[in-house]
Image: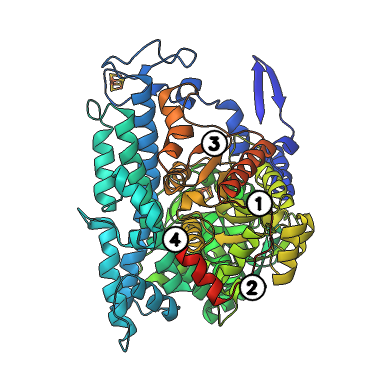
Amino acid sequence: MIEVKKAGEVHITPVKDLTACDSTAQMIEKARKDGVVTAFDRAATMKPCPIGADSACCKHCFMGPCRLNPNDPYGKVGVCGATVDTIQARNFGRTVCAGTAAHVDHGMVMLELFRQVALGNIPEYSIQDAEKLHEVAAELGIATEGRENKDIALDLAEVLERTYTQLDGEIPFAKRVPDKTLETWRKAGIVPRGAMREIMELMHRTTMGVDQDYLNLIKQISRTALVDGWGGSMVATEISDILFGTPKPVQADVNMGVLKERQVNIIIHGHEPNLFDSMLASVIDPALVAKAKAAGAEGINLVGMCCSGLEMMNRRGVPHAGSFMSTEAVLVTGAVDAMAVDVQCIKQGLASVADCYGTKFITTNSRAKIEGALHIEFDEHDPRFCTDLIVEKAIERFQNRKHPVVIPPRVDAGVHGFSHEYINYMLGGIFRGSYQPLNDNIINGRIRGVAGVVGCTSARTKQDFSHVELTKELIKNNVLVLVSGCAQIAMAKAGLCTPEAAHFCGQGLKEVCEAVGMPPVLGLGACIDNSRILTAASEMVRTGGLGQSLADLPVAGCAPEFMSEKAIAIGQYFVASGVFTVFGVTFPTMEKTKFHELLFKGLEEQGMGKWGFAKDPHEMARLMIEHIDKKRQALGLDKGRERVLMDMAERRALETA
Ligand code: SF4
Ligand code: MSK
């Protein structure tokens, strides 16, 4: 960061304090020398507003904005009389609403694509995982026996559409929720009906002069967050698996060294898998490859970034160049001939950095245009028009490269692509795929519990540092870690997504990893794929021995470096589902207010999970492990014990006892 201490006196933060990623650090140094400003340095000149950061400000009507005093939150009310709890709850609610809308809209795009593919209207795509199509359809009560995939798919699309449009009742994937958790939601009146209704109602209730009781507001906030996790996000994951393939372990390279100096380098960044899938077809098109070679390139090198990258790294092993905070830095290499983006987490600053290095910066989605970017619209009905043109633009730039190319050489190999289905198979084998071995190892204490470490990287904290420190601490304490989103890239760069990382683990987890040959950190995919954690956790409850509801499980979640509204929506759906969820960097409520107490304590008393906050990764780990131990104690598992194998008579005796 470049900090202006006082007029004329400039303090430049050393890059080692900005990022734990060597390649990104090298490129920040280069950007500074080149006179190019990135988010790392902009963050220093744009300090967060302390009143806004504490959520002590309301601008829900034009008698305001009204600012309360964070040091005396109950000392004042807004012009309309709104209290600090109303103001915080409304702000929090709108954050959840925006994050949910992003995931739900993404899911709806995938569902419409799926329907069009089933109708045979897009020959470029097909159903890649028919087995999953049958499984999900059967789970939702759709007949599959002896039927054509097309007919099953159309019925599935119709059922899943209710996730968005239904006005009353329960969303289809409520069927996946363990009974006791669903009972808690029903009692609290928070089972989601349909996404459009929940988002609309929350926007209405947070408007000036409507819902002004934080205890009532939290219900609609939770209901909206749940329609994200168990609705929009879950639909997006399941449909993407059916269309593009369910991930299974695949070796993939991560870091900026995946760029190739003598090749045409194209980066896809964003969130939806369809653009990337069509790019994969374009870059192997013989005519385009010949064109690249005629331009003097050795070939075309397609790599991913951010969550688009994770979609295709986890499914196809496509190399990945880095997370959200590395997207500007990668352009500083001068090696990127084109960066094409779709939706979400795309910094506007990319346009000017791309301009400095002559990279073709291309937007492709009608929802997300950027001033100064070249727009080539991606139409699912004719996907190759857009993706072929992106390749041609990249070749054009390769031919006219004017800037020296400096590629940080580091590449980190790892194993990625752990879907819920693969975890089932990996632990139980093909004939008895099951979560029983996982539950058994939790019961016997080899695995202390399971943690989800997810989410973004941020310009407000040292990139990757907390992700990696926290995860090392967790696995050292025998906690199995599931990762997604930009967190997965941090882990990959730290070498934690390899089976060899077992040497970082405590004895129990090490034994399990070595026996199965798996890494202690399992990469699940993009941030939308956090829904895989919900499905896996539900399966753990259903398998037995770890309580009746999600809230009983010895699990915890964390987004140590979050920055996006989507992360708050994810956090709230984990909390409402029953999971203790710790966030780092900052939290948009003030301690010692009633709304803060509700999030950090009250919801747990209603049978859900609760929020936690810590800045230091070791403190995050301590909070999570303490919670896992509390749950183990409640389950009577506080003393590690071997599972006792019982015969049928003994089992029946137990069941009737
Ligand atoms: Fe101020 Fe109330 Fe208007 Fe908010 S809704 S800006 S607190 S007057
Ligand atoms: S991209 S939401 S920075 S995980 Fe999904 Fe990464 Fe967070 Fe965006």
Q: Nearer the viewer, mark 3 or mark 4?
A: 3
Is residue 623 positioned above or below 522 on the image?
A: above
Q: Can you say which quadrant of the picture contains the N terminus? A: top right
Cα–Cα gap, marks 2 and 3? 49 Å
Residue type, numbered disc 4:
Glu
Residue 600 is situated, as x and y percent measured from the top left of the image, at 48, 33
Counting residues from the N terminus, which is met first, the one under dot 4 or under dot 1? 4
| Image depth: mark 4 or mark 1 in front | 1
User: Pointer 2 and pointer 3: residues touching (CB < 8 Å)?
Assistant: no
Is residue 216 visible in this depiction of the protein?
A: yes
Residue 389 pos. (x, y %): 46, 67
Q: Residue at x 60, y 39 (%)?
A: 38
Which mark, residue 272? Answer: 4
Q: Residue at x 62, y 64 (%)?
A: 440
Where does label 3 land, which residue? 612
Which residue is under mark 2?
299
Q: Which three-letter amino acid code belongs to the residue tagged 3?
A: Gly
The residue that appears at 66% across and 17% down in the rendered structure is: 5
Q: Using residue 493 as the reference point, say whether residue 456 is left or right of it.
A: left
